């Protein structure tokens, strides 16, 4: 690639010779390596639960757990060259497990969580041999490198949202994945009140009392999880931040005004991604609106980047 904006003359052939040695002069970079503030490449996007359910219902006719690791729809940000992430460090997907199905056990370096939308009884995940039942509105955690598989022995299809830090792990080049030797690991214990399960009733009670409630409790080192409650007309304003957020509505309906996207209304099961450096607001529309927010803020906190501030004139 030719050098641009070369301001310093050099002997003939000097720059070409550097290129053959995989070197580029710092005074004549191909493009800037640093800039005055974040330059996000990802964009805000809304996905509708209704659309995902319809597509997954159709996929159920020809996609089985035997043919695919998971029957899911990955929410891929529509930017040039992107074929997987929802935002820089996170990926979200809608997943369907039909009645009587088992999604085989595996483990991987990325952390994961499930936001449960619609399920019947006798639906559970197995995490390192422990059966963890799931119910509508639950948020269930799967820490890095924990064996996990899913089973639905109810008469109703199970729909939930998966969110993982796969893009972050890919960028760190720390990806490990392993299938369990058999379809599912055996159940060694049953913990209906597992610390990995945030029950809907508990979440709602705390959210109604406090307005904003943390759910991860440090169990996932790379993702922050919060339940947020709003009343009709209540507005939360968020300025530009370096962190990325994924929201889903679990109850009610909200209006959001998002930089570079505009005004949108979200209802139960809908998902919106707010990439870094996009201001936005959330406005409640009903008596009690509940959202789950997932962010990569713990990563920035651990690295000390959330404390950075530019010099004010």
Image (cartoon, rainbow, N blue to C red):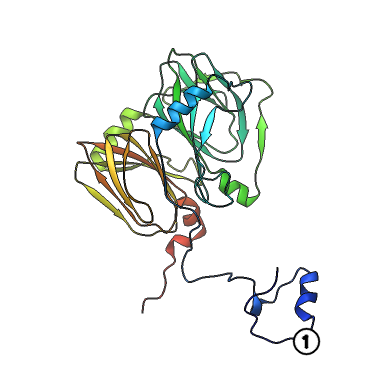
Q: Is residue 162 above or below residue 256?
A: above
State the SS at label 1. Answer: loop
Q: Is residue 80 above or below residue 162?
A: below
Name which residue lies at 39% across and 36% down. 48
Q: Which residue is mark 1?
A: 11
Image-based side of 294 in relation to 189, left or right: left
User: Residue 209 placed where, x, y %?
Assistant: 23, 39
Question: Which one is in front, 122 or 86?
Answer: 86
User: Residue 278 placed where, x, y %?
Assistant: 39, 57
Name which residue lies at 58% across and 71% down. 32
Q: Is residue 28 visible?
A: yes
Mark 1 Cα-neighbour bin, 10 Å: few <14, some 14–19, many ≥20: few
Q: Residue 176 lies in what quarter of the image? A: top right
Q: Is residue 39 above or below residue 77?
A: below
Q: Quadrant of the C terminus?
A: bottom left
Q: Quadrant of the N terminus?
A: bottom right
Question: Which one is in front, 20 or 203?
Answer: 20
Image-based side of 227 in relation to 88, left or right: left
User: Residue 279 placed where, x, y %?
Assistant: 35, 57
Name which residue lies at 70% across and 72% down. 2
Count every numbered label the image shows and give the total: 1
Question: Which one is in front, 309 or 46?
Answer: 46
Q: Is residue 90 above or below residue 308?
A: above
């Amino acid at each position: 690639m030719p050098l641009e904006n070369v301001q310093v003359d050099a002997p003939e052939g000097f720059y070409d010779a550097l290129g053959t040695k995989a070197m580029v002069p710092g005074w004549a970079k191909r493009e800037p390596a640093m800039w005055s503030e974040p330059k996000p490449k990802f964009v805000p996007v809304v996905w509708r639960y209704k659309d995902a359910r319809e597509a997954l219902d159709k996929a159920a006719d020809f996609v089985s757990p035997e043919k695919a690791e998971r029957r899911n729809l990955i929410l891929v940000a529509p930017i040039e060259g992107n074929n997987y992430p929802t935002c820089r460090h996170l990926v979200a997907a809608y997943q369907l497990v039909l009645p009587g199905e088992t999604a085989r056990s595996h483990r991987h370096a990325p952390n994961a969580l499930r936001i449960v939308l619609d399920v019947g009884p006798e639906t559970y995940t197995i995490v390192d041999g422990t059966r963890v039942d799931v119910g509508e509105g639950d948020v269930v955690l799967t820490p890095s490198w924990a064996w996990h598989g899913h089973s639905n022995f109810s008469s109703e299809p199970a729909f939930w949202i998966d969110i993982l830090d796969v893009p972050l792990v890919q960028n760190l080049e720390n990806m490990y994945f392993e299938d369990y030797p058999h379809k599912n690991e055996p159940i060694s214990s049953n913990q209906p009140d597992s610390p990995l399960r945030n029950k809907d009733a508990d979440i709602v009670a705390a959210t109604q009392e406090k307005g904003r409630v943390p759910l991860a409790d440090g169990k996932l080192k790379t993702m922050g999880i919060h339940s947020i409650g709003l009343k009709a007309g209540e507005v939360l304003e968020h300025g530009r931040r370096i962190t990325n957020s994924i929201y889903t509505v679990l109850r009610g309906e909200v209006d959001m005004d998002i930089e570079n996207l505009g005004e949108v209304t979200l209802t139960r099961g809908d998902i919106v991604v707010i990439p870094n450096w996009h201001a936005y607001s959330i406005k409640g529309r009903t008596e009690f609106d509940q959202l789950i927010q997932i962010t990569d803020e713990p990563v920035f906190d651990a690295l000390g980047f959330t404390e950075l501030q530019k010099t004010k004139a």
